[in-house]
């Protein structure tokens, strides 16, 4: 029977020392038909292992649902890793961070209670542990049957994630919680080594693990210094950087982050030269398809972009970068590297698309709306009260001419305010815009509230979304609300029978500006199976679908200038492009361009 063990100084595979040279590749950020290509390119860079997180909420959208098919087929992904001759490391959370919506924790865990919080997550809470037990019961058998001890690729499984950075849990409860996770993991047949990871910081490493669990560290520079910190906390056993940050993520409204390939290569050379093992975070970042991107909030709420390119060695669309070649050259100094090098992809097809049909959101509200909720409570319901875990909710109430101004305690995360359909303004969490003047007339006030991503790191994990707290005017609190969840993930199918009208004409034979919130649709022919890059210059903010697949959010706020369209989504003829534009566009036209544009950098 094959074995993988933690030795006195080395990892031992079948009793022989092995240096793990791994790369992070998240199956949930890559189209399944592209998994094999990305894994193969990892081997060609010299990696011997693939690491992936597992986002709980991706597999369990509701407490009574669990999905391991299609994009969620972790077993198929691990089998492809094995087929390429690589090993695997699995990190199932239950919390993963990863700039993913809610850090992977299902929003339904938190629903309920006077403060909007339900289960006491990341603690020794019976309800939380019971939920984890159910999650592990669905997931971990898939991992267990693919362990190296059963002839599969899986070498190690992680327990929790950067738990030392999670404040407010007493030391004795931390230990009881981590040991409960160990017991739940082992109960599902996991017999390979378990480990924890924490930032290479004395406090985090001392708080985030257990004496009996192997400790690893996360860092992206000063490798020898950080390994020395880890060694203080891990006196014996192999040293490993579980997240070697070779790039960084992007947030809407900021610059595109890049790091110098030569600097990253030098730090990797130091790490491998010291005999340590490594997991490149990321080898390939991929895309936050749909509404899956998370957010950070350290005083300013910053949602993560749709692109998760991460300035990784393999770009968002699977192309080897300068960093790929620089890190490959370093790996070749320490381990065997295949002679073959992946080719650069051809430029993507270029074409224009006219979105010649449109329909206002309010004209199809009944099609895309969920169950309506009316409340006369002192506060409007949150989206969590409505069991709407992502996306949009439309709130409505009546105002009078005397109300004069609208003030909210907090909006999470952005609201488009209108009076009888006429735009009034925007409330925005990032800019702390909590008030707006109202026209001096009576009418129906609506707030189209967008959840732009649940916080994935820090104490604000698990907070409810929507309108939070009291909504008031110059004269009173607004209490008589209707709240309508919008099922926009399913919009293409729900709009199939809608009454579309021709796009606007500018009077000179061309299409003129268009107003939102509204859907816009066009068709195009293309190269089947080829990656495309969708450019939406002149559009403001919204969602984009190709052939029914929600690509994600777009925004003129940047930095990202294009949306990645995976080749498997594209057919030769009759492709469908659908946009939900929330504000307005210069013209109902879009372009597909030859290469991605991830935006300006600090340099």
Image (spheres, helix red, strand yellow):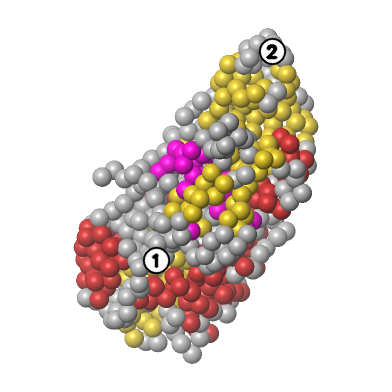
Is 376 placed left or right of 583 in the picture?
right
Observer-nearest of 582 and 257? 582
Residue 232 in percent (x, y) is at: 28, 61
Label 2, secondary structure: give it: loop
Residue 441 - label: 2
In the rendered image, the vertical position of residue 180 relative to residue 488, given as above or below: below
Name the residue: 41% across, 57% down: 594
Quadrant of the image occupied by residue 24: bottom left
Q: Are marks 2 and 1 in contact (CB under 8 Å)?
A: no
Quadrant of the image occupied by residue 434: top right
In the rendered image, the vertical position of residue 372 relative to residue 435, given as above or below: below
Name the residue: 26% across, 45% down: 603
The magenta segment is: 532-559
In the rendered image, the vertical position of residue 119 relative to residue 323, given as above or below: above
Observer-nearest of 462 and 127? 462
Label 1, secondary structure: give it: loop
Name the residue: 32% across, 63% down: 321
Query: Label 2: few (<14), some or many (≥20) within 10 Å?
Result: few
- How far apart are the two marked residues, 2 and 1, measured between alpha carbons? 58 Å
Residue 466 in percent (x, y) is at: 62, 36
Name the residue: 55% across, 27% down: 426
Observer-nearest of 521 and 91? 521
Observer-nearest of 253 and 462? 253
Q: Residue furthest bottom?
A: 1
Dominant secondary-structure state across the stretch colored magenta:
strand
Residue 197 in percent (x, y) is at: 41, 61
Is 356 placed left or right of 79 in the picture?
right
Q: Name the residue that disc number 1 marks.
A: 346
The reply to whether the magenta stretch includes residue 533 is yes
């Amino acid at each position: 029977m094959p074995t993988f063990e933690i030795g006195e100084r080395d990892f031992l595979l079948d009793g022989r020392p092995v240096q793990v040279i791994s790369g992070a590749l998240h199956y949930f950020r890559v189209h399944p038909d592209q998994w094999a290509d990305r894994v193969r390119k990892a081997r060609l860079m010299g990696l011997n292992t693939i690491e992936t997180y597992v986002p709980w909420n991706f597999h369990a959208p509701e407490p009574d649902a669990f999905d391991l098919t299609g994009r969620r087929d972790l077993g198929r992904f691990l089998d492809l890793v094995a087929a390429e001759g690589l090993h695997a490391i699995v990190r199932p959370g239950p919390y993963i961070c990863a700039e993913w919506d809610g850090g992977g924790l299902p929003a339904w865990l938190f629903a309920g209670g006077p403060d909007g919080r339900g289960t006491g997550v990341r603690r020794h809470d019976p309800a939380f542990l019971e939920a984890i037990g159910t999650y592990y019961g669905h997931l971990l058998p898939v991992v267990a049957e693919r362990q190296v001890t059963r002839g599969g690729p899986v070498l190690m499984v992680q327990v929790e994630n950067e738990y030392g950075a999670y404040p407010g849990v007493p030391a004795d409860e931390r230990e009881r919680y981590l040991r409960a996770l160990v017991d739940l993991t082992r109960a599902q047949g996991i017999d390979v080594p378990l480990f924890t990871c924490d930032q290479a910081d004395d406090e985090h490493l001392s708080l985030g693990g257990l004496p009996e669990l192997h400790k690893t560290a996360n860092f992206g520079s000063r490798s020898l210094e950080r390994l020395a910190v880890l060694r203080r906390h891990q006196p014996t056993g192999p040293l490993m950087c579980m997240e070697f940050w070779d790039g960084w993520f992007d947030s809407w409204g900021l610059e595109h982050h890049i790091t110098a390939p030569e600097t990253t290569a030098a730090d990797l050379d130091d790490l491998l030269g010291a005999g340590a093992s490594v997991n490149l975070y990321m080898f390939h970042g991929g895309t936050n398809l749909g509404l899956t991107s998370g957010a950070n909030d350290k005083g300013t709420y910053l949602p993560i972009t749709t692109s998760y390119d991460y300035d990784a060695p393999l770009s968002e669309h699977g192309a080897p970068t300068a960093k790929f070649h620089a890190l490959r050259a370093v790996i070749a100094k320490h381990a065997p590297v295949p002679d073959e090098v992946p080719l650069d992809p051809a430029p993507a097809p270029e074409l224009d698309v006219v979105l010649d049909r449109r329909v206002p959101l309010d004209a199809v509200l009944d099609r895309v709306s969920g169950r309506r909720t009316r409340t006369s409570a002192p506060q409007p319901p949150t989206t969590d009260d409505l069991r709407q875990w992502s996306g949009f909710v439309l709130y409505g109430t009546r105002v009078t001419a005397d109300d004069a101004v609208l003030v909210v305690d907090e909006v999470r995360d952005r609201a488009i305010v209108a009076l009888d359909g006429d735009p009034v303004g925007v409330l925005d969490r990032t800019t702390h815009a909590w008030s707006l003047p109202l026209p001096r007339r009576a009418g129906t006030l609506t707030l189209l509230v967008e959840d732009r991503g649940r916080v994935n790191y820090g104490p604000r994990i698990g907070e409810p979304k929507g309108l939070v707290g009291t909504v008031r005017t110059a004269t009173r609190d607004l209490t008589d609300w209707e709240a309508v969840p919008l099922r926009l993930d399913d919009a293409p199918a729900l709009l199939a029978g809608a009454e579309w009208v021709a796009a606007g004409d500018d009077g000179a034979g061309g299409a003129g500006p268009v107003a939102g919130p509204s859907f816009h649709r066009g068709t195009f022919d293309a190269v089947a199976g080829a990656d495309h890059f969708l450019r939406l210059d002149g559009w403001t903010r919204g969602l984009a679908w190709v052939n029914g697949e929600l690509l994600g959010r777009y925004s003129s706020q940047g930095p990202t200038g294009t949306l990645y369209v995976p080749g498997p989504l594209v057919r030769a003829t009759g492709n469908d492009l659908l946009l939900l534009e929330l504000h307005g566009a210069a013209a109902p036209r879009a372009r597909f361009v030859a290469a991605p544009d991830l935006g300006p950098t600090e340099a």
